[in-house]
Image (tube, rainbow, N blue to C red):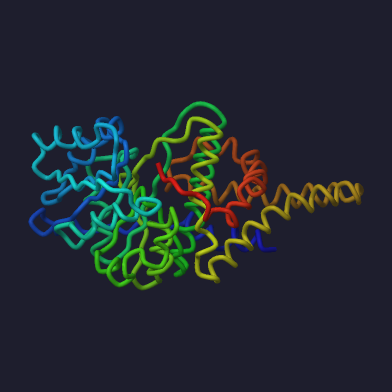
Amino acid sequence: MLQWFFWGIRFRHLARYAQPMYTDVTEEKLPPVSVILCARNEAENLKKNLPLFLEQDYPNFELIVVDDNSTDKTAAVVLEFQKKFSTLRLLSIRTQTSPGKKAALSLGIQQASFERLFLSDTDCRPQSRQWLKVMQRSLSDSTIVLGYGPYLERSGWLNRFIRFEASYTAIQYFSFALAGHPYMGVGRNLAYHRSVFWQAKGFDKHVHLISGDDDLLVNQMAHAGNTTINLSPEARVYSAPATSWRGYYIQKRRHLSVGSHYRWQHQIALSTLALSHFAFYVLTVLLLILIPNWWHILTLNFLVRMGVVLHVSHGVSKHLGEQNLLPFLPLLDFLYLVYYIVFAPSLLTGSRIRKWK
């Protein structure tokens, strides 16, 4: 029954969601904004991706790169781009900071020239030159905007699973936000007013954790009255996916390590979703073994659920640009059980992680 609730009701609203059409405003009325990227040994990524941020079609913005104690040519790359782009600023940290990138991000936020902040990562690339404009349209009505940060498409099952997991996670936090219960966003594509950061007293509540500069801040400060989502294709920010299962495991373990610090109601809702998903398959298999005569009932139950999942996913995939995952969805949905088993311990051991790069 719980799976029917999530897929048949909660997620179905996202499938039917229509992105608001904003009245175009003249460039003179667009407020100035600050874009912040944190970098630790990201010289190569900056060479590839920095131009895509710098060449945004927006009249008044600054791009801040915070060099977080890099040992490569990160600073040199930024300084070279500065010769061409006056909007680019370099901030440098030359001492060992607390775990994660919160110290670097805090510095960028504190030193930003403008109230409206747009966050991403150096391994990311905006889908279009309209990213800032489209996201700003949402930020004009709210103080927090949750954007989508998909992964670039590559060949192979690892890439399919990474993109499926990212889209499934997005389905959850976008759907909950639409229902008035926002609980997270991704730092690859997130915007908020600096006042949100000050009201939260920065990252003080979770500064000891390596992750959480995005989702824990949103979890702490977001509510129905100040948060919106933006699903416009032009507002997507693509990220480079892990290229090995080990790399993916390390990355996801770090991301999931902060889940136990969400508000208790969000933990209950997400745990209920995960347990109902896991139990659906486990109970189906057990009943097939114990009561083989029920195979036709269990098969029908499976087909009906999967039909609902496919129907809702078809609508959602148009928003997320992941239509080519639909043929693999039944298998990926089943394989997600392995994801639960592998990463569940991260909720208990995540605090031991000490590096973000």
**Residue at 61% in and 48% down:** 343
Image-based side of 174 in relation to 271, left or right: left
Q: Residue furthest front?
A: 95
Image-based side of 55 in relation to 105, left or right: left
Image-based side of 304 in relation to 222, left or right: right
* Residue 127 seen in render: no
Q: Quadrant of residue 45?
A: top left
Where residue 344 appears, as percent x and y from the top left, is 63, 52
**Residue at 19% in and 42% down:** 56
Which of 22/79 is in front? 79
* Residue 138 seen in render: yes
Where residue 340 appears, as percent x and y from the top left, is 64, 49
Q: In this picture, is 232 found above or below 11?
A: above
**Residue at 14% in and 43% down:** 88
Q: Quadrant of residue 140?
A: bottom left
Where residue 197 appears, as percent x and y from the top left, is 29, 66
Image-based side of 168 in relation to 189, left or right: right
